[in-house]
């Protein structure tokens, strides 16, 4: 991509770690998942009186929203790939570890 093209299409800015800001960046389908998880997290917080779960959950969804903003549909593709790996017991697109080590060594000039 040329510099001019990258300037005309700047990367989006991640949403703030705020439920409303995050939800505003989600597709309707993801917003439904977000809302479902929001209720679960709120119940956990009420029981534990600890905001750690909330902070982790907001971080997860902030990254998910940003990923979707940069590459729409990426969450759905990621979940489909995870389902494929879980159902087949392996990743047909995976590169063997030895091959990956060789690629890394080659790139490092070793």
Image (cartoon, helix red, strand yellow):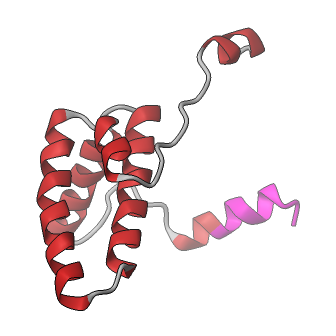
| Pick the front one: 48 or 75 | 48
In this view, the residue in front, 94 or 55, is 55
At x 19%, y 43%, the residue is 31
Drawn side of residue 100 relative to residue 80, left or right: right
Residue 1 appears in the figure: no
Residue pictured at 25% horizontal, 60% vertical: 82
| Image quarter hosting the C terminus | bottom right
Up/down of 60 relative to 21, above or below: below
Magenta segment's dominant SS is: helix
The answer to which of 56 and 42 lies nearer the viewer is 42
Quadrant in the rendering for residue 37: bottom left
Q: Position of residue 58 (x, y in %)?
A: 37, 61
Q: Nearer the viewer, residue 24 or 107?
A: 24
Locate residue 2: give its quadrant. top right
Residue 88 lies, in percent from the top left, at 17, 66
In the rendered structure, the answer to whether residue 100 lies left or right of residue 42 reads right
Occupied quadrant, residue 97: bottom right
Look at the image and give the residue range highlighted in magenta. 101-110
The residue located at (72%, 62%) in the rendering is: 104
Question: What is the count of numbered marks?
Answer: 0
For this view, does 18 lie left or right of residue 102? left
Q: Residue furthest bottom?
A: 48
Query: Which quadrant of the figure contains the N terminus?
Result: top right
Magenta span includes 95:
no
| Residue 55: percent from left, percent from top | 40, 70
Residue located 69% across and 65% down the image? 102
Residue 105 is covered by the magenta coloring: yes
């Amino acid at each position: 991509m040329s510099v001019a093209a990258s300037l005309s299409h700047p990367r989006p800015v991640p949403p703030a770690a705020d439920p409303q800001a995050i939800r505003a960046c989600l597709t309707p389908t993801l917003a439904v998942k977000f809302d479902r998880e929001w209720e679960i997290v709120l119940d956990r917080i009420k029981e534990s009186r600890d905001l750690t779960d909330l902070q982790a959950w907001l971080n997860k969804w902030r990254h998910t929203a940003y990923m979707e903003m940069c590459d729409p549909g990426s969450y759905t593709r990621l979940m489909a790939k995870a389902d494929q790996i879980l159902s087949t017991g392996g990743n047909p697109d995976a590169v063997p570890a030895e091959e990956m080590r060789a690629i890394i060594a080659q790139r490092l000039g070793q």
